[in-house]
Every structure is written in structure tokens, then in C-alpha cells.
Amino acid sequence: MSDLKVNVIAHPLIQHKLTLMRDEETGTKDFRQLLEEISMLMAYEITRNMPLTEVDVKTPVTVCKSKVLTGKKIAVVPILRAGLGMLNGVVNLIPAARVGHVGLYRDPETLKPVEYYCKLPSDVGERTLVVVDPMLATGGSAAAAIDLLKEKGAKSIILMCLVAAPEGIKVVNEAHPDVEIYVASVDECLNDHGYIVPGLGDAGDRIFGTK
């Protein structure tokens, strides 16, 4: 893992909630709520270095110097469909963020991601895009989504996932070395079916209660 470029967010609350999500006995309602909570905590961490500037503000007592955010604004871009489970957590923390959506499916013959939906804010080139997807498995969908965003004019992109396989991190690192990756856990590997081990199963099915 030493050659992988990835930021692991090891906050105790995130790790505790991730353990609950891994449990196969955790039902849809709790799984969905835990994912939203973890997403908010992760968003707190990835915005830690956002630039600030000083402004004058008049309090009920006096005028003082205080800090406000500056620099690029944020847009959140979930990769459909599982990424939707992370959206509210980020937007709850950054309510002014714009929201885009990217939909991809894997072609059964070529096994390559194919775009079926893309709707983005008109000013993507002026925003930092936080791409969210609970699972970074093979890395194919994430890399393709980032390709698409760059084609649309995006210049600043962060990828935020819950659980990642080393194989997926490597693919994104090689395809997009400029993109910072944030995860709650780097798991062991992918199995023969492309599932992250130990992982937490199919995130989309567990979020939406489908099979």
C-alpha cells in the first residue's frame, strides 16, 4: 500500500460507524443512516484545509475581524446509484454546495463503463468537485466518471469513498494522479466477482433495500 496515493480518515467515530455498516445484520434503515453520518464526518475532514480570508463583522458588542471561506466553491457529484447515499451527509455540512449527477453502467461484453446520464452545474470549471461513491472496487467507474468531468471542464476534483480496494486506488492514481482520494478504509483485495474483501457487500442494494 506504500506506493498508493490515498488519504485514510481514521477518526474513531468514522471507524466505529463503518464497523456497524460492515455487519451483515445491519438493516437498510440503519445502513443508510450510518452512511449519511459517515459522509458528513468525512466531508468535515476533507474540507479541513479550505482557504479562509478575514472580513469585518459587527457583533452586538463591537466590530471585529473574523474568518470566512474563500477560494473555489464546492459541488458534490454522486456516481449513480450508490453515491446518492453519501449526498445528504455532504450537503448537510455544506448546504450551499451545488449538486451534479453522473450515471455509468458496465457493458456486459466489453466490461467497460458506459455513460448513461450526466447533469452538472454550469460552472464546474470554477468549483471543486467532490465525487462520492461508497465503494472504490476496480476503479473503472470512478476513473471514467472523472474522465467525463474533466471533459466537461472540471479542473479541481476530489474522490471520496467509504471503502476501497488497493486495485481500485491504483487505477485512479494512474489515470488521474492529480485527484486526491479520501477513504475510511483500504481493504484487502477484490475477489473473483469484483467485490471488495472484506468490504460490506453491495452498497447500492444495502442502501435501497434491493437485490
Image (cartoon, rainbow, N blue to C red):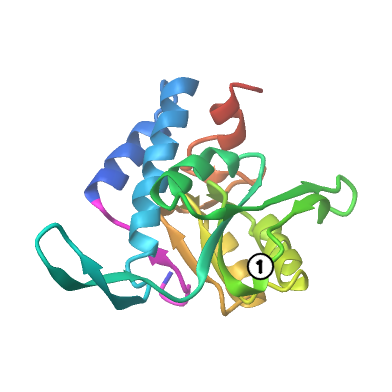
Name the residue located 64 percent from the left edge and 22 percent from the top edge.
210
Label 1 element class: helix
Name the residue located 32 percent from the left edge and 67 percent from the top edge.
48
Left or right: 171, with 90 as reference point: right
The one nearer the camera, 162 or 41, is: 41
Characterize the magenta stretch by its predominant secondary structure. loop
In x, y percent, where is residue 97? Answer: 52, 55
Name the residue located 49 percent from the left edge and 66 percent from the top edge.
181
Left or right: 187, with 155 as reference point: left
Quarter the C terminus occupies: top right
Q: Which residues are magenta?
A: 2-11
Name the residue located 11 percent from the left edge and 67 percent from the top edge.
62
The one nearer the camera, 105 or 22, is: 105
Which residue position holds label 1?
Answer: 124
In x, y percent, where is residue 6? Answer: 45, 68
Is residue 9 depicted above or below 157 in this figure? above
Residue 166: tell me if it is visible.
no
Left or right: 122, with 110 as reference point: left
Picture quadrant of residue 20: top left
Left or right: 111, with 187 as reference point: right
- The crowd level at tag 1 (other Cα within 10 Å; few <14, some 14-19, many 20+) is many
The one nearer the camera, 23 or 131, is: 131
